[in-house]
Amino acid sequence: MIKKIGLILGPAFFALILMLPPVAPLSPEAWRAIAMAAWMLTWWITEALPLPVTALLPMVLMPILGLADPKKAMSNYSDPIVYLFMGGFVIALAMERWGLHRRIALNILRLTGTNANGIIFGFFLATALISMWISNTATTIMMLPMALSVVALIDQGEDKKDHIGMRNFALTLMLGVSYASSIGGIGTLIGTPPNVVFAAQMKELFGKTIGFGQWMGVGVPYAICLLLIAYFVITFLVYPNGLGKIQGAKERIAEEIAQLGPMSRGEKFTAFVFCFAAIGWMFKIPIEKALPWLPLDESIVAILAALLLFVVPIRWGKDLEFALKWEDASRMQWGILLLFGGGLSLASALSGTGIIDLIGKQFAGGNGSSWLFLLGLVAVTVFLTELLSNVALVMVFIPVIGAVAKGMGMDPVALCIPVTLAASSGFMMPMSTPPNAIVFSSGYVTVGQMMRAGFWLNLVSILLMTILCKLLIPVFF
C-alpha cells in the first residue's frame, strides 16, 4: 500500500510545487530543483519503484526543467567514484567465481578453534573481513549456508534439539553473520553503497575528495570495536549458549577445506589482483609521493584491477582462459551504479541552484561541534535506518547535514561521516538491511529476538560512533 501511495505522491508533489510561485529567497531554478527532489525523495523513501529506476529521473527532468543540458545531466552517471565501485564489483565477482572468499572464510574458522563461542567468533571475523571488499548482501548469502551446516552438525541427537543452549548457539550464529556483514562493510569505501554515496556527494557538493586510506582510518577502528562489542554482547550477555567444545566441528571444517583442493591458477591470480588493488587504495598518498609522475587515483586502480582480470590469460593453450569472462559481468549490480549517478545529479541540482548554501545560512552561529548535538544526530540516523533504505537515507541526509555543518562554520566531513556510519548501523529489524532479511529467512531468528539484540547494538553503536568520530576525524581529515 505504501508503495502505491508513494508512486502517486511523487509526481503529485512535483506538479504541485511547480504550480506554486517560488518562495523567497529561492530562485525559479532552485524552486524547480526542489520539485525534482520532492519527486525523487518520495519514491526513494517509499521505495515505490526500485531505487535505480528513480535515479534515472534527473536524466530527463534536469534538461526539461532548464537545470542542465543533457550532457551535463548525464555526466554524473560516469563520475570517477562510480568506476571505483564498479572495479570493486569486478574483483568481488572474480573472488566468487574462483571461491577465494570461501577459502579465506574457512581458514579463519579453522584458526578460531572448535569451542562453540570460538566458532561464533570465527564467523564474525570471517564475515566482516570478506564484507569489507564484497557487498554485505553477497557475503551474507555466501556465509549463511556455511553457518547452517555448522548448526546441523552440532544439532545431533534428541538431547540437544530442544536445548536452550543449542537454540542460542544457532540464533547467535545467524545474527553474527548478519551483523558482521553490515559492520565489515563499514570499514572500506567500497564495502557498502552508503560509503560510496558519501564520498561522491562530498566531492560534488563541497569539493572534498575522500581518500580510501582516509576513510579506513575512521571506518576500520569503528568496525573492529563494534564487531568485538557485538560479539561479546550477543554471545555472553543476550544469548549465551554454554555449549563448550563441539565434537566434530574441527573435522567438518577440515573436510570443507579439503574439498576446495589446492588453489587454482584463477584463484591465485585473483588473490594477486585483490592485493594489488588493496595496496593501491590504502597507500595512495605514499605511492604518489614516491612516484610523482604516476597519476594514481582510486578509480584508476579499480579499473586497472578489473582489466587485469579480463585481459591477462591465466592459462595458455588452444583457447585462452581468463580469470573473468564478460558473461560474468551479467551478475554485476549495475543498478547500484545508476543509483550513484542519480544521487550525484540531484546533489548537483541542489548545489548549483544555491539551495545547499541557503540551508547552511540558516544555521550560522550554531554549535554543531558539541558532543550532545553529534550524539543526537547519530541517534536519529540510526533509528531512521531501521525503517528506511540506508542508501536513500544517506542521499537525503548528506546534502542537508553538510549544509548545516557549513552554516555552523564546520567542515562538512565532521558531521557527514557519522551520518554515513549510522546509516549502516541498523540492527533491530529484518527490513533494516538485506543481511538482516536474509538471516531472518533461515527460520532460526524471530523478530523479537532480532529486536532484543539489535536494540543493544544500536545503543552501543551510537555511543561508539560519537566517541570515535570526535577522536579520529580530526586526525585523518
Image (tube, rainbow, N blue to C red):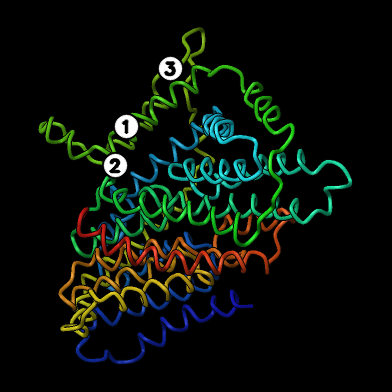
Whether residue 96 is visible, yes or no, is: no
In three-dimensional space, the C-alpha distance between marks 1 and 3, rounded to whole angstroms, equals 15 Å
Q: Which kind of residue does numbered mark 3 sit on?
A: Pro
Q: Earlier in the sequence, mark 2 or mark 1?
A: 2
* Residue holding disc 2: 299
Query: Outermost residue toward the top?
Result: 317
Q: CA distance from mark 2 to mark 1?
A: 8 Å
Residue 101: percent from left, percent from top: 52, 34
Give me the C-alpha separation between circle 2 and circle 3: 23 Å
Closest to the observer: 88 or 371? 371
| Residue situated furthest right in the rendering | 158
Q: Nearer the viewer, residue 50 or 123?
A: 123
Residue at 83% over, 48% down: 160
The residue identified by callout 3 is 313
Point out which mark residue 205 bears. none
Residue 154, how many percent across, how many down? 76, 41
- Disc 2, SS: helix
Foreground of the two, 30 or 199: 199
**Residue 196 location, quadrant:** bottom left
Q: Which class describes the residues within 10 Å of circle 2: few (<14), some (14-19), or many (20+)?
A: many
Residue 304, label in figure: 1
Give the quadrant of the C terminus: bottom left
Q: SS of the residue at dot 1?
A: helix
Quarter of the image that includes the N terminus: bottom right
Q: Please determine whether, in this image, residue 123 is positioned above or below residue 240.
A: above
Say left or right for 108 vs 296. right
